[in-house]
Image (spheres, helix red, strand yellow):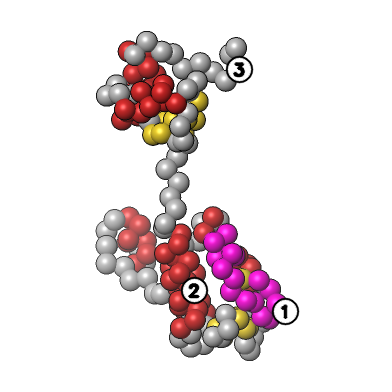
């Protein structure tokens, strides 16, 4: 008695590691124009292609979308990278991407990396500017906070415990905002 193992089965069992997965074949169904419009050509546009275009383009008609700067930024918030959008457009379009589209994608990619979320912080308000300056410069607290104006300090939540210890060492306590 015997069984036949396919190349995929051999790879799954760890017997073979050199399995070749063919690249998915995409039929060009879009034409990307220099005026940032994407036009469906020929066949009916697949639902997945429509959903992708809706993520970063504004529908102009049933078969035309306009690539939009704000929608590209919003697509980034939904998990799309500019490189994924570029790859999608290239794979589904009839020709090469026009220079105007490439520049727009490059501009959005550059702008997306210029503002970075560094996580949550606690905003601490001091009674007077001298106290805020003390905490912002003292060796026990300075490395855990950043001055934000003359009476406020910004403390990353990851540094909050160390900042509180430093305050106690200086003879202060961080009160909550609902305390009198």
Q: CA distance from mark 3 to mark 2?
A: 48 Å
* Quadrant assignment, res 45: bottom right
Which residue carries the number 1 mark? Answer: 61
Whether 157 is among the magenta residues is: no
Which residue carries the number 2 mark? Answer: 104
Q: Position of residue 133 (x, y in %)?
A: 38, 27
Identify the residue at horizontal 31%, vertical 68% (top origin): 19
Vertical placement of residue 126 versus 68, above or below: above
Identify the residue at horizontal 27%, vertical 67% (top origin): 18
Q: Is residue 2 visible?
A: no
Q: Residue furthest right?
A: 61
Instruction: Count residues near mark 2 (Cα–Cα under 10 Å), then give few for <14, some for 14-19, many for 20+.
Output: some
Q: CA distance from mark 3 to mark 1?
A: 54 Å
The numbered mark at residue 3 is none
Which residue carries the number 3 mark? Answer: 178
Q: CA distance from mark 1 to mark 2?
A: 22 Å
Q: Nearer the viewer, residue 104 or 54?
A: 104
Q: Secondary structure at mark 1?
A: loop
Count of numbered circles on the image? 3
Vertical placement of residue 110 versus 164, above or below: below
């Amino acid at each position: 008695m015997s069984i036949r193992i396919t190349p995929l089965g051999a790879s799954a069992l760890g017997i073979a590691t050199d399995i070749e997965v063919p690249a998915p074949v995409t039929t060009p169904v879009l034409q990307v124009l220099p005026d940032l419009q994407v036009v469906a050509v020929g066949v009916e546009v697949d639902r997945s292609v429509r959903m992708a275009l809706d993520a970063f383009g504004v529908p102009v008609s049933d078969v035309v979308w306009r690539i939009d700067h704000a929608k590209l930024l919003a697509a980034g918030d939904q998990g799309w990278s500019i490189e994924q959008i570029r790859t999608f457009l290239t794979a589904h379009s009839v020709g090469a991407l026009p220079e105007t589209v490439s520049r727009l994608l490059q501009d959005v990619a550059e702008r997306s990396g210029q503002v970075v979320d560094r996580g949550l912080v606690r905003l601490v308000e001091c009674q007077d500017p001298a106290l805020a300056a003390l905490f912002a410069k003292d060796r026990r607290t300075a490395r855990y906070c950043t001055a934000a104006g003359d009476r406020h300090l910004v403390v990353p939540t990851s540094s909050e415990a160390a900042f509180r210890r430093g305050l106690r060492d200086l003879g202060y306590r961080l009160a909550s905002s609902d305390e009198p």
